[in-house]
């Protein structure tokens, strides 16, 4: 994972990435949960996309495997618009191009310092104790 992210920006850039992640995650969670509560279609493919969007929204909010999830959400949005344009209903509007553009930005920038990725995969300070010589 360290190869994926060069740095985990702190300060204002880290807060900006957190706000961007929360905005994308909130949009994914709200619109996919609205579809679950009021289903319009009973197709298996639509339900798989909605469950994928719920998982991706949760992952965005927590900042876990952010780069992988952001790339996957951008690809899923593009796939829906090119192969199944009928699925791009108002309930599945979380897979639109502005969300895909923000997901590509998160893919390229990384999750930021305020994320589970930074906690699990961030740089560590290694303290090597001095050995007493006799």
Image (cartoon, grey):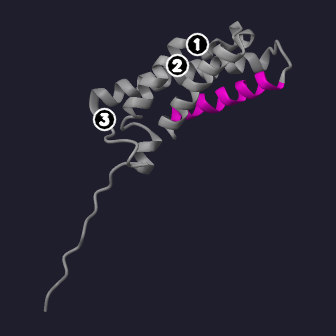
Quick one: 125 or 97, which is closer to the camera? 97
Q: Are marks 2 and 1 in contact (CB under 8 Å)?
A: yes
The residue sitting at the right extreme is 42
Disc 2 vs disc 3: which is toward the camera? 2
Task: Identify the residue shown where x is 47% and y is 35%.
Answer: 67
Residue 3 appearing in the image: yes
The residue sitting at the left extreme is 134
Mark 2 crowd level (few <14, some 14–19, many ≥20, 10 Å Cα): many
Disc ID at residue 126: none
Mark 3 crowd level (few <14, some 14–19, many ≥20, 10 Å Cα): some
First to last magenta residue range = 44-62
* Quadrant in which residue 75 is drawn: top right
Give the residue pinned by disc 3: 9
Disc ID at residue 100: 2
Residue 63 appearing in the image: no
Q: Is residue 92 left or right of residue 64?
A: right
Q: Is residue 126 above or below residue 42?
A: below
Q: Earlier in the sequence, mark 1 or mark 3?
A: 3
Task: Identify the residue shown where x is 24% and y is 70%.
Answer: 128
Q: Earlier in the sequence, mark 2 or mark 3?
A: 3
Q: Position of residue 25 (x, y in %)?
A: 55, 24
Q: The residue tagged with tag 3: helix, strand or loop? A: loop
Q: Position of residue 52 (x, y in %)?
A: 67, 30
Disc 1 vs disc 3: which is toward the camera? 1
């Amino acid at each position: 994972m360290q190869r994926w992210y060069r740095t985990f920006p702190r300060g204002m850039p880290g807060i900006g990435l957190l706000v961007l992640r929360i905005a994308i995650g909130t949009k994914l969670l709200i619109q996919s949960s609205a579809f679950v509560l009021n289903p319009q279609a009973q197709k298996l493919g639509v339900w798989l996309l909605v469950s994928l969007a719920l998982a991706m929204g949760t992952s965005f909010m927590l900042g876990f495997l952010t780069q992988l999830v952001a790339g996957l959400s951008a690809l899923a949005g593009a796939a829906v618009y090119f192969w199944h344009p009928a699925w791009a209903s108002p309930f599945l509007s979380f897979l639109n191009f502005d969300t895909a553009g923000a997901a590509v930005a998160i893919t390229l920038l990384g999750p930021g310092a305020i994320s589970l990725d930074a906690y699990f995969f961030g740089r560590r300070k290694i303290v090597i104790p001095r050995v007493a010589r006799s």
